[in-house]
Amino acid sequence: MGELTKIEKAISAIDTAKKIFQGLTKGVADLKDVEVRATFIELKSALVDSQETILNVKQEFDAKDQEIQRLKEAFKLKDSLVLFAHHGHYHKADENGEPYGVPYCSRCWEVDHKAVSVSRKSKCPECGAELWRAVPLNRNKENY
């Protein structure tokens, strides 16, 4: 069973426990016993805390899944980007090894593994790194 499925199952179990708890509290609402009522309040608090913790873990898993997907995309792109030292940034390379398309920030690619295209001002919008050239090369190439 996957981790997310386990978490979803735990959330469902806590929801069921909360419903049972609500049914029980209706039955003991008339009781004057302070200890019983305090125990029910403690139980309810524990259920809510558990549910919040599980939801937080689920959000963390979702964030990790997104990061994994981003890294998979970067890995696919890895072989198609080449650093052109005289330009100071990465480009896609054609079959002859010549750069084409928009330039990508070398700092973002090397440090964060993000292919961030730079603007005409030759400045990366992600990290602020300044680059020497920022216009598309070989404009007649497809798939820039």
Image (cartoon, grey):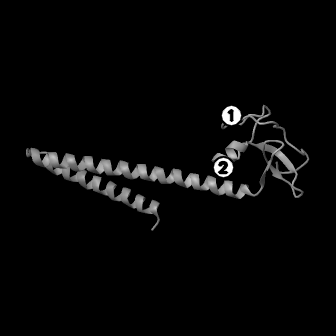
Which residue occupies the extreme front position in the image? 85
Foreground pick, 1 / 11: 1
Q: Examine the rendering and report whether any part of residue 114 can be seen.
A: no
Foreground pick, 99 / 63: 99
Q: Amino acid at mark 2?
A: His
Look at mark 1 in the image and give the residue it sits on.
128
Disc tally is: 2
Q: Position of residue 124 (x, y in %)?
A: 71, 37
Within 10 Å of the Cα at label 1, are there few (<14), some (14-19), or many (20+) other Cα atoms?
few
Q: Position of residue 76 (x, y in %)?
A: 70, 58
Residue at position x 72%, y 55% in the image: 77
Q: CA distance from mark 2 to mark 1?
A: 15 Å
Which residue occupies the extreme left position in the image? 32
Hey, which quadrant is residue 133 in on the image? Answer: top right
Sequence order check, earlier mark of 2 and 1 = 2
Foreground pick, 66 / 115: 115
Residue at position x 36%, y 48% in the image: 52
Look at mark 2 in the image and give the residue it sits on.
113
Q: Amino acid at mark 1?
A: Gly
Q: Position of residue 114 (x, y in %)?
A: 67, 47
Q: Say which mark, if any, is on residue 16.
A: none
Q: Position of residue 128 (x, y in %)?
A: 68, 34
In the figure, 133 relative to 60: above or below?
A: above
62 relative to 20 in the view: left or right: right
Residue at position x 75%, y 38% in the image: 118
In the figure, 135 relative to 53: above or below?
A: above
100 relative to 73 in the view: left or right: right
124 relative to 25 in the view: left or right: right
